[in-house]
Image (cartoon, helix red, strand yellow):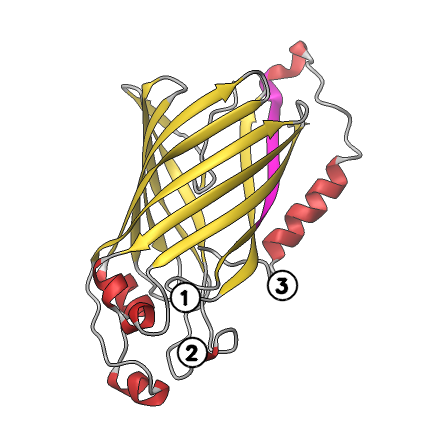
Amino acid sequence: MVSFWKASPAIAAVSLGLTLIDAHPGMSQDATSAKSQWIVTLGGSAEYGPSSEGSKHLSVSGMPSFDVRRLGDAAEYSAPDDNIDYGLFDIGGVEIGPVVGLRGGRSPLDDSDLHGLRRVHWNFDAGVYMQYWPIEDRLRVRAETRHALWGGDGLLADLYLDWFQPLGDRWLLSAGPRLSLANSTYMRNNFGVSATEAASNGRVDAFGASGGVKSIGFTAAATYTLSPAWSVQVYDKYSRLVGDAADSPITSKIGSADQNVIGFALNRSFQIGF
């Protein structure tokens, strides 16, 4: 889970944007300028879940969200754990494009159980996503591969399978399983423990973590459209750490393999022209 509530410039930018766009006129449908008009959706969510990956301690955090599409294009369904993407290619129905995300960190200052263990800094990551709709607007298959932009935090690959079910004109339900993999660099940084760290902490043993499957899980969400401009969403993201992520003493001795996040999101859409 990305914990980005404290002193986050991204959250501040979202909050400022939501304030400024209230002064913007409603989303007009000017057919003569449709080709240069875009619909931008900004949002922010509050989440309650583990303070860091593998932790048993819970805290409140926040996440920004962003989406953009041309005026006239239908809004595409998405899940609350999708990272920010932009489709560049469509090859035989497979959408491909860049994706960026945020990674949370951990610090002994926030969790005394982590005393003596290395600090993991928050990070941006970037990569490529692909998604395909075997059943249009209902069943979606998605994959994301993202690498940390700095700090040597390694590579993540996430697989999604989601079913989307509209209920009337305002409700949208979605749910589906998750599978997350990580390379050895990511696993060593987040779940490995050196002999020095083990001695300093006193509660964990040295542990060498290898790459592989990191977690399996399930995400469910309910979205309610208040108006063409506003929507709210509640969601739950559960994951179970497996393999070396679960065997690490960071998880097994001072943390928990069960990771559950409850979230609430508010989104605002508005029209801009270039």
Q: Nearer the viewer, mark 3 or mark 2?
A: 2
Q: Is residue 231 above or below residue 185?
A: above
In front of the other: 76 or 20: 76
Other residues around mark 3 within 10 Å, as few (<14) / some (14–19) / many (≥20): few
Task: Find residue 268 and report its image quarter.
Answer: top right
- Identify the amino acid type marked 1: Ser
Query: Could you give the CA–CA distance between mark 3 and mark 1, rounded to whole angstroms?
Result: 21 Å
Q: Is residue 50 above or below residue 273?
A: below
Which mark identifies residue 55?
1
The chief SS type of the magenta part is: strand
Q: Is residue 195 above or below residue 15?
A: below
Task: Find residue 185 and report its image quarter.
Answer: bottom left
- Identify the amino acid type marked 2: Asp
Q: Earlier in the sequence, mark 3 or mark 2?
A: 3
- Identify the amino acid type marked 3: Ala
Query: Could you give the CA–CA distance between mark 3 and mark 2, rounded to whole angstroms?
Result: 23 Å
Magenta-drawn stretch contains 40: yes
Q: Provide the residue designation for mark 3.
A: 7
Residue 132: x and y in percent read 31, 26
Q: Are marks 2 and 1 in contact (CB under 8 Å)?
A: yes
Q: Provide the residue designation for mark 2.
A: 113
